[in-house]
Amino acid sequence: MLKKLLLATTIVATTAMPAFAQEKTEFKLAWSIYVGWMPWGYLEDSGIMDKWADKYGIDVEIVQINDYIESINQYTAGAFDGVSATNMDTLSIPAGGGVDTTALIVGDYSNGNDAVIIKGEGDLASLAGKPVNLVELSVSHYLLARGLDSVGLSEADLDGVINTSDADMIAAYATNDVEAVVTWNPLVSTIMEEPGANKIYDSSDIPGEIIDIMFVNTETLAANPDFGKAVAGAWYEVMALMAAGDEGALTAMAEASGTDLAGYKAQLASTEMFYDPADGVSFTSDDALKSTMVEVAEFLFDKGILGEGAPSPDFVGVEYPDGSTTGDASNVKMRFDTTYMQMAADGAL
């Protein structure tokens, strides 16, 4: 998932809610193609989102953006009220750029969907001296760093990291110049069909660290709680269909992502989906999330992309459901909130 800091603004260190948050009735969410985010497209196409929005007297439009980074940038610029993104990319782009952002629905974590793949025999140690193609400064870059660290290597031990767009990754892998790639599904599944493709490390080796979330503007949510209720209600209706193995819903998601039902089910097998909202609440409330976000902040700071002029990995404050924070408590711009997931779990939507 592409992550490159294209937007940055001056941060005003405050945790207070701005006075300009407004009530409104029309909202827009952005999403991009990824196994765990296909339900967003289905919500729009099936009419389930409209049903829940009507219940609360609002309108919620869900828009597919073909470029992941563009979806986050548009959200950060205010064109959307929410966006599907990873924890890492949200910390660096909107939160690092000063946009107070809340995790409305923690949908899943990658449990094998992101992978390091080499041609032929070898392991992580064999990456030494080789070039690696990936989307630079993305969760792929983070996965590579975590993998290298596990075998006592660092990026300096490679023959460079080559920035390669996700749109070009499959074609790049097919060339003789490419020896190793790091990418995500559905690209991983396609590359692994090639003779000699060898997956040597994946996100199941760092479970719970690459998290897929629907983030929304904190001020917008605070002023419009019915927005949160409608989105959560619609999402968990689809989660119930998926958990029950509804082939109509799953087939629609598969086709929208460019695969068939079997292919989509294979991708879901390497995705830890939180079909039950109580599971999302439990994951988000676990202290392990705090450790993960500290690790992510340190990676982003090391790469110089935590925020313009960030003086330390603690530059951006992150708040958790118990009210505790990591990072700068006077500059909280990213919040994990279980309110609406808990309402879904309690049948209160």
Image: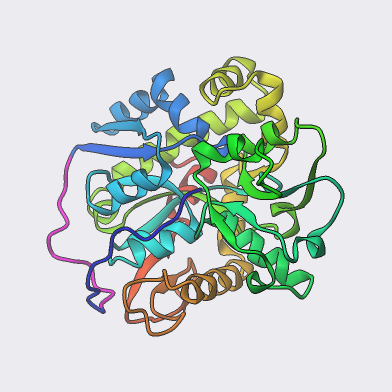
Question: From this viewpoint, which residue is outermost toward the left?
Answer: 20
Question: From this viewpoint, which residue is outermost toward the right?
Answer: 121
Q: Is residue 11 magenta?
A: no
Q: Nearer the viewer, residue 141 or 263?
A: 141
Q: Nearer the viewer, residue 54 or 16?
A: 16
Check the image and report above or below for 189 versus 339.
Answer: above
Q: Tell me residue 1's x, y (percent).
A: 51, 48
Q: Tell me residue 21's x, y (percent).
A: 17, 57
Check the image and report above or below for 292 versus 237.
Answer: below
Residue at point 85%, 54% (across, down): 122
Check the image and report above or below for 319 versus 268.
Answer: below
Check the image and report above or below for 119 versus 282.
Answer: above
Looking at the image, can residue 244 be seen?
no
Which quarter of the picture shows residue 150? bottom right
Residue 253 relative to residue 269: left or right:
left
Looking at the image, can residue 58 be seen?
yes
Which quarter of the picture shows residue 153? bottom right
Q: Quadrant of the C terminus?
A: top left
Residue at point 77%, 75% (across, down): 152
Residue at point 56%, 71% (across, down): 290
Residue 243 relative to residue 150: left or right:
left
Q: Is residue 16 magenta?
A: yes
Q: Tell me residue 181's x, y (percent).
A: 66, 49
The region drawn magenta spans 14-24
What colour scheme governs how the chains and residues are painted in the rendered image of this protein? rainbow
Q: Main secondary structure of the magenta part?
A: loop
